[in-house]
Amino acid sequence: MKNVVITGTSRGIGFELAQHFAKNGHQVLALSRNTKPLEDVNHPNIKILSVDLSSHSDLEKVSKFITDNWESVGILIHNAGKLINKPFTELSSEDFLDVYSVNVFAVAELTKLMIPKMQKGTHVVTISSMGGIQGSMKFPGLAAYSSAKGAVITLSEVLAEEYKKQQIAFNVLALGAVQTEMLAEAFPGYEAPISAQQMSNYVYDFAINGNKFYNGKVLQVSSTTP
């Protein structure tokens, strides 16, 4: 059984993932600003921290929890995301910063804090988007979001190379349309063929086994456009 850290666990895929790992006997540290949904679940294998991922002091709380309770991390899943849907000329510098703070900077900062707690065989999985894949179909209004999701892909590829001697694996899942609240923000009224629970099943299996087959890879997990 593994110690698993998951970000963005108040809704959607992250909410389902935390429960999936817990029900299968793993110890989960669930990170989100809104802790109530998982508090209501009240699973003994899920520990919850209220964390603003853009706050360094909040991220330090994660590091302290692991030092005090676990000592090591077996799986880290960067699932949290922030999306702003606006025409490009209406996007402010603050909008870009807000999106990048969660989708890129927090991924880098949390990973940096977790590296000393990772051992041989640790798997770091970053949830990106098909919008971040070079050459994929792009959509108006998602300049900040899609460019951030592209940046985090490259970050993961670099870290895979940097930590391959320690045998810490970094991989990215670039997801297509999944029926979540975030999809509704990006494409109001669109109904995806994949539910959050179905995708969480896929991510769970990949997080457990994917590092045996992949490192530094970006897997496109999409059956539809968007």
Image (tube, helix red, strand yellow):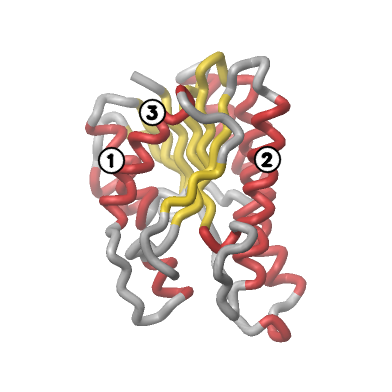
Residue 208's tag is 3
Q: Quadrant of residue 119?
A: top right
N-terminal of the two: label 1 or label 2?
Answer: 1
Q: Mark 3 is on which residue type? A: Ile
User: Which residue is farthest right?
Assistant: 93
Q: Quadrant of residue 18?
A: top left
Residue 19's tag is 1
Give the residue drawn at x 67%, y 58%. Answer: 100
Q: Is residue 118 left or right of residue 176?
A: right
Q: CA distance from mark 1 to mark 2?
A: 25 Å
Give the residue drawn at x 36%, y 60%. Answer: 223
Residue assigned mark 2? 109
Q: Secondary structure at mark 3?
A: helix
Most foreground residue, 195 or 43: 195
Q: CA distance from mark 3 to mark 2?
A: 23 Å
Most foreground residue, 107 or 50: 107
Q: Position of residue 51 (x, y in %)?
A: 53, 47
Q: Position of residue 2 (x, y in %)?
A: 39, 22
Q: Is residue 177 left or right of residue 169?
A: left
- The mark lying in front, picked from 3 and 2, is 3
Q: Callout 1 environment at 10 Å: few (<14), some (14 to 19), or many (20+)?
A: many
